[in-house]
Amino acid sequence: MNEENNLEQPQETLGQALKKRREEAGMSLEQLASALKLSVLQLQRLENDEHELLGPITFVRGYIKSYCRELKIDTQAILALLPEQVEPAKKSKMQSFSRRTEKEANDNRLMLFSYFILAVIIGSSVFWWWQNSSPALEEQTATIMPSQLETSELAPAAEQLSSETEQLNAQPATSSVPPESENAQPATNDANVVEAKKPIEEQSNLDPEHSTVVMHFNEDSWVEIHDGNGDRIAFGVKKAGYVMTVTGPQPFNVVLGKHQVVDITFQGEAVDTSHFAKNRLAKFTLPLSE
């Protein structure tokens, strides 16, 4: 009967033997894990005989020896309970995981290289645009509005011509004047012309509706001018030696491409533009604000 009872009782496994010795020693899994520098999960798998989840057989034997050494039990007796063949689980999945990791690493390198190429292209485009934007602005040409510019430039000459014509038409009425009077007549006419010009200049100086700006271009330069009504009265590139006169209500909004090569007078007084930065567009208002 005793032999039959012994046969019916199952043999104690390695995990059961370890757990029994640990409980007899009064040590918890957390305490033993801290002493062995292992995780609680690893000790639980060892006590549950889940050896295939702990890695290669060499690792399993090392865990068992450390366990026995800490609890001071017979190592050889415990190792005798270890199954002969213990293979790590899901070996094929580990291989596939390594392949996936390698593929992800290759994809990451390819993505970084693509970002680098894109950054180089964007940087080159920005640099090219920055280099060409300034010359393009200075070389821009446009047609000046003929009706506005010609009227503003020719208006003073037309007024002078009409005044001289009226004086010449009035001259034949003095045909009976002696020779000395006839000789003196041209001087009188010249004096009348000078006197006729002065009121025009004085009127332009006093009346803000007829302010005058004169620009002498020593070199080619781009210019744009808007008068006080917001009308554009000058626009485009002026050649070297060109003298431009514009008239209109002030203030004038002026933009010059090369202000250092242009001499400017406003209402007969010189305008100082030396304080503007060179090699840049000069934007200012006439009369200049203090």
Image: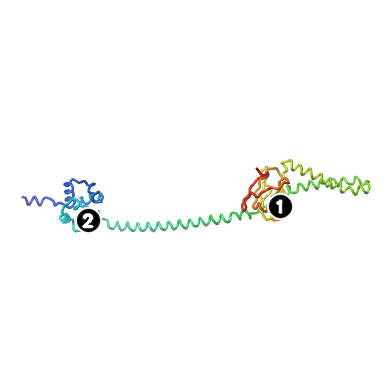
Give the number of the disc on residue 62. Answer: 2
Give the number of the disc on residue 53. Answer: none
In the rendered structure, the answer to whether residue 194 lies left or right of residue 35 reads: right
In the rendered structure, the answer to whether residue 110 lies left or right of residue 16 reads: right
Quote the CA–CA distance across marks 1 and 2.
98 Å
Q: Which of the 4 image quadrants contains residue 230?
A: top right
* Residue farthest to the left, as pictured: 1
For disc 1, the marked residue is 216
Q: Amino acid at mark 1?
A: His
In this picture the colour scheme is: rainbow
Mark 2: few, some, or many residues within 10 Å (few <14, many ≥20)? few
Residue 147 visible in image: no
Residue drawn at the location 60% of the way across and 54% of the way down: 134
Q: Secondary structure at mark 2?
A: helix
| Lower sequence index among marks 1 and 2 | 2
Q: Quadrant of the C terminus?
A: top right
Residue 6 visible in image: yes
Residue drawn at the location 57% of the way across and 56% of the way down: 131
**Could you say where residue 21 lies in the image, as x and y percent from the top left?**
16, 49
